[in-house]
């Protein structure tokens, strides 16, 4: 199966908008990136070559046939000429690997790159004079770039605008203009070696914080911890192993809670003409035509995952069938940080005069254990609109 990168067509898509050049003799891109800033992105084995050939200023480009270059099996490609004299050619070689050649303004070779790809990631051998000196990997999913040479690996800070992409990624070229690369240097043969990981695990010092985590399917709570020894690889960078401590009940502030112990402070209120009136919920009265808001607390904080409300309406003085179902919501007025309780709230729609509304609450832990809340045993909470 071909491993060809299709680099020629990728380059064509990038060469669309004009670039600029500084007037001081120092190459400057349209975004103000200088050769020194571009070179500083890479380790010394590559930075000196990038500073010599930064490929950041104005450029023209066109198709260049394989008949104009000596290497046997070289495909048609793209020649790119930069306004300060640098030149680049992108094509594929006889083995169907992507090849990139870069020359300085004086016509001497800067470097060559031979590329291969796995799903989602490009791997490049870097050479000068046909001699391999390093490897570069480029993750096409997250943009991560790593360069390995001289026994170490450098992860490029691609969040820095000067360091985005690979060093030979020309942009802003005027297509269809006359440009010839000329003599092609001898590229290094594909090495296929595996570069070392792109990071030193000892530099992985920012694991995610401990956190409560709800488990899929079961919805059981657990504390996720990332304090184990980190590792790193050539795709994902730093990897922090996660350990889970199951919680028998709930979880709050990255700590397992105790069991659900109570549903308390069940209160009601109605707002009439901007004034808040308490509603007694043990067969008390509520203003007719006004919605009633009920709040309740569950203890300790994080122990209850939900509070179910079974309710019904009926004429005053009769027993209601409490088969309708709603769920209370977390009350945003619950003080942050306190661990004693969660506060929940729900609002019942306004009822006409003479209508009784009866309800009971059922608080549930993530494990399914629960507590029923009523005004008294076998007596639901209730109020009558009048």
Image (cartoon, rainbow, N blue to C red):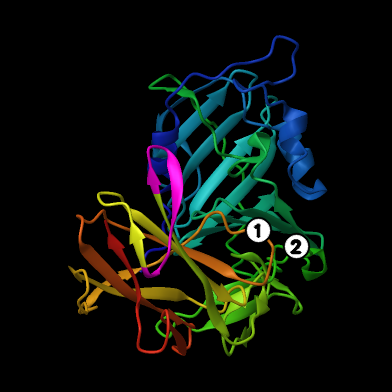
Report if residue 77 is visible in the image: yes
**Is the residue under label 2 in contact with that under label 1 (CB below 8 Å)?**
no
For label 2, the residue is 206
Q: Position of residue 347 (x, y in %)?
A: 35, 58
Say which element carries label 2. Answer: loop
First in sequence: mark 1 vs mark 2: 2
Q: Residue at x 49, y 55 (%)?
A: 141
**Residue in front for this viewpoint, 380 or 133:** 380
Q: Residue at x 52, y 49 (%)?
A: 99
Find residue 240 and report its image quarter. bottom right
> Which class describes the residues within 10 Å of circle 1: few (<14), some (14-19), or many (20+)?
few
Find residue 322 and report its image quarter. bottom left
**Residue in front for this viewpoint, 180 or 56:** 56
Q: Position of residue 338 (x, y in %)?
A: 69, 65
Say which element carries label 1. Answer: loop
Q: Position of residue 135 (x, y in %)?
A: 67, 58
For the C terminus, the quadrant is bottom left
- 278 in the magenta segment: yes
Mark carried by residue 336: 1
Is the magenta region chiefly helix, strand or loop?
strand
Mark carried by residue 178: none
Q: Is residue 64 left or right of residue 325?
A: right
Residue depth check, mark 1 versus mark 2: number of the one nearer the observer: 1
* Cα–Cα gap, marks 1 and 2: 26 Å
Find residue 337 and report its image quarter. bottom right
Residue 228, compared with residue 112, is above or below; it is below
State the residue lying farthest toward the top. Answer: 23
Where are the magenta residues, as a range?
Answer: 271-283
> Which class describes the residues within 10 Å of circle 2: few (<14), some (14-19), or many (20+)?
few
Residue 237, compared with residue 92, is above or below; it is below
């Amino acid at each position: 199966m071909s491993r060809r990168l299709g680099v020629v067509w990728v380059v064509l898509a990038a060469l669309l908008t004009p670039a600029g050049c500084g007037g001081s003799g120092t190459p400057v891109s349209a975004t103000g990136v200088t050769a020194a800033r571009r070179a500083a992105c890479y380790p010394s084995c590559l930075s000196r070559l990038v500073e010599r050939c930064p490929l950041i200023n104005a450029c023209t480009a066109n198709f260049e046939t394989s008949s104009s270059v000596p290497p046997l099996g070289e495909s048609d490609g793209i020649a790119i000429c930069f306004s300060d004299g640098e030149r680049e050619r992108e094509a594929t070689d006889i083995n169907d690997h992507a090849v990139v050649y870069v020359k300085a303004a004086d016509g001497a070779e800067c470097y060559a790159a031979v590329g291969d790809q796995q799903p989602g990631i490009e791997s490049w051998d870097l050479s000068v004079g046909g001699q391999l000196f390093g490897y570069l990997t480029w993750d096409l999913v997250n943009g991560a770039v790593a360069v390995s040479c001289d026994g170490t690996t450098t992860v490029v800070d691609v969040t820095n605008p000067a360091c985005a992409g690979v060093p030979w990624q020309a942009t802003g070229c005027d297509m269809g203009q006359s440009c010839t690369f000329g003599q092609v240097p001898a590229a290094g043969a594909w090495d296929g070696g595996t570069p070392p990981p792109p990071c030193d695990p000892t530099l992985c010092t920012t694991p995610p914080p401990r956190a409560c985590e709800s488990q899929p399917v079961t919805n059981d709570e657990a504390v996720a911890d990332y304090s184990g020894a980190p590792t790193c690889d050539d795709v994902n960078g730093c990897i922090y192993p996660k350990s889970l401590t199951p919680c028998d009940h709930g979880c709050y502030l990255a700590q397992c809670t105790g069991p659900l112990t109570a549903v308390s402070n069940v209160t009601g209120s109605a707002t009439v003409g901007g004034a808040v009136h308490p509603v007694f919920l043990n067969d008390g009265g509520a203003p007719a035509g006004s919605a009633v808001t009920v709040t309740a607390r569950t203890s300790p904080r994080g122990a209850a995952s939900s509070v179910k409300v079974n309710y019904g309406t009926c004429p005053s003085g009769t027993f209601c069938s409490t088969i309708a179902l709603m769920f209370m919501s977390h009350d945003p007025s619950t003080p942050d940080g306190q661990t004693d309780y969660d506060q929940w709230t729900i609002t019942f729609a306004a009822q006409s005069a003479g209508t009784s509304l009866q309800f009971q609450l059922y608080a549930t832990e993530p494990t399914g254990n629960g507590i029923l809340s009523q005004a008294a045993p076998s007596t639901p909470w209730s109020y009558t609109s009048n």
